[in-house]
Amino acid sequence: LPWNIHSPQTFRSQGDKHMSSEDTENLFGEERYLGKNVRVFIAKNSRLGARPVGITFVLTAANIPLSKYISIRDALLSINHVVVGYMINALNPPLRNHRTKAQNVRDVFDELATEMRGVDRFDIVGHSVGGKIALLVAALHN
């Protein structure tokens, strides 16, 4: 099923009432657990018959909610990319170091690539520590 995209205006109109970070994450896309139980949020263009041209990962800065990246998501959706939001939780680095998070991105991509046969373009955007992890993905996982 195509994901019904919430517009940035919808998000701003709710700004006066308190929303938990979990509520705002769900604005980014459909919550899924892929790879080795990695929590991601996936947004797809809802135009009928629109075949995605690529999968783009958005990796956040440390503990920054995905709701802060809605404008980036919308720009990518407008050029028909599937957008995968991955919030980087920096509070547990000993168990999930940056290399592990880079592997998580690769595992999620592999699963999505199998689901979306024919989509072979893979892009990644990272902010702060998300940028570091994006570089590790590029260096370690061609």
Image: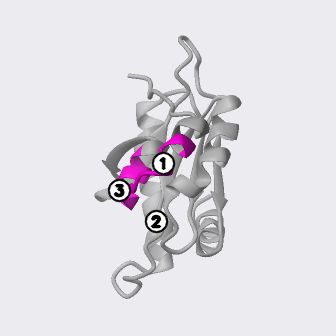
The kind of secondary structure element at disc 3 is helix
Render colour scheme = one colour
Alpha carbon distance from label 3 to label 1: 23 Å
Q: Which residue is mark 3?
A: 22
Q: Residues within 10 Å of mark 3 (few under 14, many from 20)?
A: few
* Residue 109: numbered disc: 1
* Tag in front: 3 or 2: 3
Determine whether 108 is above or below 113 in the image: below
Determine whether 97 is above or below 55 in the image: below
Q: Is residue 1 left or right of residue 28?
A: left
Q: Position of residue 72 (x, y in %)?
A: 67, 47
Q: Where does the N terminus fall, quadrant-wise?
A: top left
* Tag in front: 3 or 1: 3
Disc 2 to disc 1: CB gap under 8 Å:
no
Amino acid on which disc 2 is placed: Gln
Q: Position of residue 41 (x, y in %)?
A: 43, 47
* Residue 103: numbered disc: 2
72 and 110: which is toward the camera: 72
Amino acid on which disc 1 is placed: Phe
Residue that sits furthest to the bottom in the current view: 94
Q: Position of residue 15 (x, y in %)?
A: 50, 50
* Residue 6: numbered disc: none
15 within the magenta span: yes
Which range is magenta?
A: 12-26
Q: Is residue 138 left or right of residue 83?
A: right
